[in-house]
């Protein structure tokens, strides 16, 4: 069984990119309503962008965890891991830019709204239908924010599930590798025992051959002495 060669980086990175692009589109749409920050569309876009930024921050943070796991377990080639580091740094920088743009424009719009409210307070009070409209807009905004948070939790749950599956596969792989190492160790022990046994047998054969040679020399000398005496 080969080592795990995949992770959830590509899926989660594509999700972050889609969310980043969606936030840029919403920021552009929001700029078109800057002249009427009390409008329903402006409030709706503001809430959606705020919720999206929170979700993107969480996704980018979790993406760093996935990258760290890939680096720790070396599940991808070094060149690919290096490219992922670059992509993560770029995504983080773009997230900071979007956050800065959103916060800056929001503060400017709030300042303009406060200035406008001062003049409105000097005149007649706002009619009741407008207050009802604002309340309905806030309810819709809160509902959409809850739905976005629920979707974010579902994505996070799916990501944790993929990480759990990856950890399980990796644990099984480590166990298999340990079994292979145990079998190899047992085989090496048997081979070593066989080599030692064969070495002892060869030593005994060498000693036997040396003794036979000595007896042949003694017999030859004995025969030579008898021949000399007889002659």
Image (cartoon, helix red, strand yellow):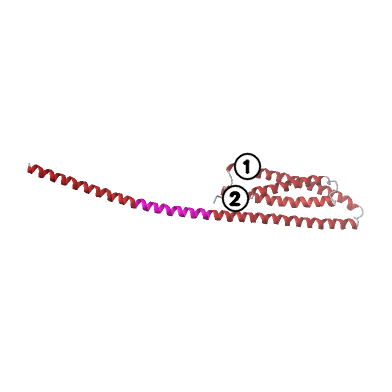
Q: Position of residue 6 (x, y in %)?
A: 61, 49
Give the main secondary structure of the magenta stretch: helix
35 above or below 161? above
Viewer-nearest residue: 231 or 95 = 231
Q: Secondary structure at mark 2?
A: helix
Question: What whole-number distance in Å separates the C-alpha atoms at marks 1 and 2?
Answer: 15 Å
Residue drawn at x 64%, y 56% is 161
Q: Is residue 194 magenta?
A: yes
Residue drawn at x 71%, y 52% is 55
Viewer-nearest residue: 220 or 125 = 220
What residue is shown with label 2? 69
Residue drawn at x 87%, y 51% is 118
Viewer-nearest residue: 8 or 148 = 8
Query: Which quarter of the rendering shows the C terminus?
Result: top left
Q: Position of residue 173 (x, y in %)?
A: 54, 53
Left or right: where 224 falls relative to 81: left
Magenta region: which residues? Answer: 174-196
Left or right: where 118 falls relative to 21: right
Residue drawn at x 73%, y 55% is 151
Q: Secondary structure at mark 1?
A: helix
Q: Is residue 138 magenta?
A: no
Q: Earlier in the sequence, mark 1 or mark 2?
A: 2
Circle number at residue 103? none
What residue is shown with label 1? 83
Q: Residues within 10 Å of mark 2 (few under 14, many from 20)?
A: some
Q: Position of residue 109 (x, y in %)?
A: 81, 47
């Amino acid at each position: 069984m080969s080592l795990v060669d995949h992770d959830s980086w590509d899926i989660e990175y594509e999700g972050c990119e889609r969310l980043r692009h969606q936030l840029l589109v919403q920021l552009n749409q929001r700029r078109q309503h800057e002249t009427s920050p009390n409008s329903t569309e402006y409030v709706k876009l503001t809430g959606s962008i705020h919720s999206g930024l929170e979700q993107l921050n969480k996704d980018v943070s979790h993406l760093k965890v996935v990258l760290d796991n890939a680096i720790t377990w070396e599940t991808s080639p070094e060149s690919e891991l290096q490219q992922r580091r670059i992509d993560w740094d770029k995504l983080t920088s773009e997230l900071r830019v979007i956050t800065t743009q959103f916060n800056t424009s929001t503060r400017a719009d709030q300042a303009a709204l406060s200035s406008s409210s001062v003049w409105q307070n000097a005149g007649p009070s706002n009619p009741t239908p407008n207050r009802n409209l604002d309340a309905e807009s806030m309810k819709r905004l809160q509902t959409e924010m809850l739905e976005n948070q629920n979707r974010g939790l579902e994505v996070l749950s799916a990501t944790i599930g993929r990480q759990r599956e990856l950890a399980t596969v990796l644990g099984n792989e480590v166990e298999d590798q340990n079994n292979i190492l145990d079998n190899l160790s047992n085989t090496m022990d048997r081979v070593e025992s066989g080599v030692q046994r064969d070495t002892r047998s060869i030593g005994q054969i060498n000693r036997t051959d040396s003794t036979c040679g000595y007896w042949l020399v003694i017999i030859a000398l004995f025969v030579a002495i008898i021949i000399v005496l007889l002659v």
